[in-house]
Image (cartoon, rainbow, N blue to C red):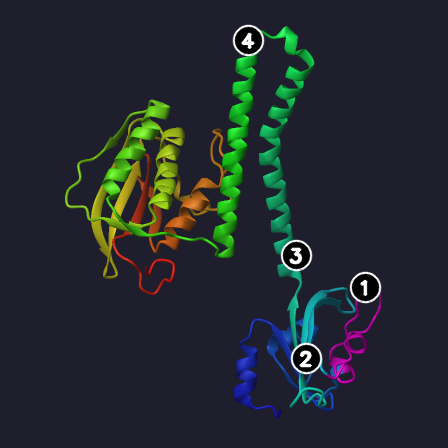
Amino acid sequence: MPSDRTTDELLDSLPDGVVVADAEGVVTHVNAEARRLLGTDVQVGQGLREVMALQDLDGHDWYDAVAPYTGLSTRRLAAEQSWRLDDGTELLVTARFMRPRPTKPVSHVTVALRSARSRELLDRERSDLVATVAHELRSPLTGVRGFTATLLERWDRFSDDQKKLIMQTVHNDTDRLTRLIADLLEVARLDTGRLSLLARRFDAVDEMTHILESVQAATGREIRLNPVEDVPAVFADPDRFSQVMTNIVDNAVRHGEGTVRISAEATRVNGRGFVEIAVEDEGRGISPEIRGRVFTKFWKHGQRGGSGLGMYIAHGLVVAHGGVIDIGDAPGGGARIKVLWPTGPNLDDPLLAG
């Protein structure tokens, strides 16, 4: 596999380090990222053993352990493993062994390398996620355990009204746990691409009227639906639509102040039709500096409760529909959450093409 300028330029454009060696174990290609990771003195023409001077934590050499030319004759891949340079820097290394036919000698070896820092960052994020989830679950569970333990130990000392109050508190905590688990499952579906949408056309204004009445009955806050005219039907999953808009209206009630106002109107973006639904409050709003964090996992602002997953899920569901969700300023000074819902299917999206 002779080196040429075009191949070298293509390899240099790759984000991972790449080392290629021929049938004799002579390096024919080393891209820029591989030189950065392995050292600038690595050159074409050196032996693969010399270039891949890596060891594991037990002191085994990469070349001897992987045996690129003398290993099992049907082997084609060495799965990604952690190896270290002399200075202790950790690299993640994968190797592929190319043969003209199975059981034939290796014609060339391709090695891919990347820094382990990305994996460390991912591991740290996963640990943070587990810690946050554990904290969110522990709080209501502690309440449930405490109240049930109290009832078991002192059942005869409580009046019926006191027992009813304790059981209502336990019920509220278990309801909170159920909502949190449902949110976590929804996050998992969004993150793994396993979300299913049953999209159809329906009247968004009628649905928003039901949402408004439900939230208003539960909170007692004043919510107004501004007059709307000639608003087309939206094309979305009705359950997901209700989930998103209920969360947004509920957030405006819980975190905002004054009257919550809802408006709906037809609009077009890049030739596609949408229904724009805006939810406004009269509170302090959301400063531009933190708006980018509102749609991240476990984002919380202020002293009021919640799992911090609602807006992350709302954003994911809107985007999955081919829509847009945005945060701005309301004319009265509060927050304005704007959602664009499509009026027709996106034929390029298998989830929505129908």
Camera-side mark, 4 or 3: 4
Range covered by the magenta-colored residues: 49-73
**Whether residue 234 is situated above or below residue 85 in the rendered picture:** above
Please state, as top left, top right, bottom left or bottom right, where the N terminus lies in the image.
Answer: bottom right
Residue 143 at x, y percent in the picture: 60, 24
Q: Is residue 72 left or right of residue 257?
A: right
Q: Secondary structure at mark 4?
A: helix
- Residue underneath mark 4: 160
- Asked whether the viewer can see residue 10, the reply is yes
Residue 272 at x, y percent in the picture: 25, 59
Camera-side mark, 2 or 1: 2
- Residue underneath mark 2: 76
Q: What distance separates the C-alpha of mark 3 from that of mark 2? A: 28 Å
The reply to whether discs 3 and 2 touch (Cβ–Cβ < 8 Å) is: no
The reply to whether discs 1 and 3 touch (Cβ–Cβ < 8 Å) is: no
Q: Earlier in the sequence, mark 2 or mark 1?
A: 1
Q: Earlier in the sequence, mark 4 or mark 3?
A: 3
State the predominant SS element of the stretch in magenta. Answer: loop
Instruction: Name the residue nearer the viewer: 30 or 206.
Output: 206
Q: What's the amino acid at mark 3?
A: Glu
Camera-side mark, 1 or 4: 4
Q: Secondary structure at mark 2?
A: loop
Residue 302 at x, y percent in the picture: 47, 32
Q: Which of the 4 quarters of the picture holds residue 255?
A: top left
- Residue appearing at x 40%, y 49% in the figure: 317
Q: Earlier in the sequence, mark 4 or mark 2?
A: 2
Q: Which of the 4 quarters of the picture holds residue 241?
A: top left
Q: Secondary structure at mark 3?
A: helix
Residue 57's disc number: 1
Q: What's the amino acid at mark 1?
A: Leu
Q: What distance separates the C-alpha of mark 4 from that of mark 3? A: 55 Å
